[in-house]
Image (cartoon, grey):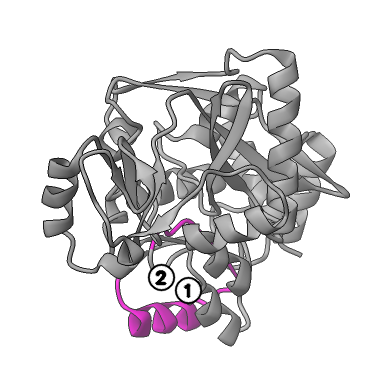
Amino acid sequence: MMINETLRKDILNRFKNKKIAVLHGGQNEEREVSLRSGKNVYKALTSFEELKDNCILIDVQDAYDLVKTLKENNIEYCYNILHGTSGEDGTIQGLLESLNIKYTGENILVSAVCMNKVYTKRIWKSSNVSTSDFVLLKDVKDVNNTSAGGLNFPIIIKPISSGSSVGVSLIKNKEEFDNTIKKIEDINNYFLEPYIKGKEITVGLVKEEDDIYVFPILGINSKNEIYDYDAKYTLGKTELEVPAKISKDIEKKVIETCKRAYTVLGCGGLSRIDAIIANDEVYLMEVNTQSGMTDTSDVPAMAKNCGIEFADITLYILGLLK
């Protein structure tokens, strides 16, 4: 993603008289992360002279109030930095389309599919994109001391539709499995994966004319046993390695796999794909179509590594809107 002075001026000229709203907050478990992301995005956009008087920051808490605010301010474009349920699952996208307001990120269908980790993995498997096996929690009948639903312990349990590693747990044995299940209210929204011990990485991708731009691959060294919510958003809990310390051959395999994964899902905006490298194989885990833009988020770290300022990547994402 090369944003030069010519492209920067072009985007600023296109949006200098447009009314733009940055949507953040929401009413789910990722609210705090979204609030932090939104403040950073708003600060970045308003750092440009051409945009500073055209942007407003909206804390989305109620659909009725949101529609009212958008109409009162004659908003034409939304920079969507809502995370999780309603923010990246097609809900807010449908609302904005009904108001004829253009928005950043993926469309309704792609947002809904990518938010659902099981749908995503099914598409990847049907397209021969490497991803780990999985079992729906509701389908697990047999659990013994060594396995659950055909997957051997240790296993990972995840919500089907949630982000920021919320609700992700490492389960090592039957006792831990039983204790974890007792705390889950809706087993229909969870699935299991084998625990793959390897190099955790995340890969940022964005559409660039007729190609896909891949940011420097980021290695994740968590001080927790797994890269969970606590490790992801607590300073000092995770060491980010940019670029990831992997061989050139593996790097090539990661890039090819992630580009294909991005394409078969129909992505066209900024996405981030999480993966694990084990025994020279690349296993894609999930895709995030509303990547965080906090001070500890992955994409800003990737961009910084290749000399892209936070304000410029924010502007570039806005510039994808036509």
Question: From the viewer's perspective, is 55 left or right of 281?
Answer: left
Callout 2 environment at 10 Å: few (<14), some (14 to 19), or many (20+)?
some
The image quadrant of residue 136 is bottom left
**Secondary structure at numbered mark 1:** helix
Amino acid at dot 1: Ile
Q: Nearer the viewer, residue 92 or 111?
A: 111
Quadrant in the rendering for residue 249: top right
- Residue at 40%, 70% in the rendered image: 86
User: Which stretch appears magenta?
Assistant: 61-84
Q: Is residue 270 left or right of residue 256?
A: left
Q: Are marks 1 and 2 in contact (CB under 8 Å)?
A: yes
Find out whether residue 7 is within the magenta segment.
Answer: no
Judge left or right: residue 204 versus residue 61. Answer: right
Residue 17 percent location from the top left of the image: 67, 64
Give whichever of discs 1 and 2 has the lower sequence position. Answer: 2
Q: Is residue 69 found inside the magenta-colored segment of the image?
A: yes
Q: Secondary structure at mark 2?
A: loop
Residue 54 appears anywhere in the view = no
Give the amino acid at mark 2.
Answer: Ser
Q: Is residue 265 visible?
A: yes
Q: Position of residue 304 (x, y in %)?
A: 58, 24
Q: Label 1 belongs to which residue?
A: 92
Residue at (54% x, 36% y) in the render:
275
Q: Position of residue 83 (x, y in %)?
A: 41, 57
Labelled disc at residue 86: 2
Q: Is residue 129 above or below residue 103?
A: above
Identify which residue, 56 or 156, lies in the foreground.
156
Name the disc covering residue 150, or none. none
Circle 1: is it few (<14), some (14-19), or many (20+) Cα within 10 Å?
Answer: many
Residue at (49, 60) in percent of width and height: 118
Q: Is 245 rendered above or below residue 6?
A: above
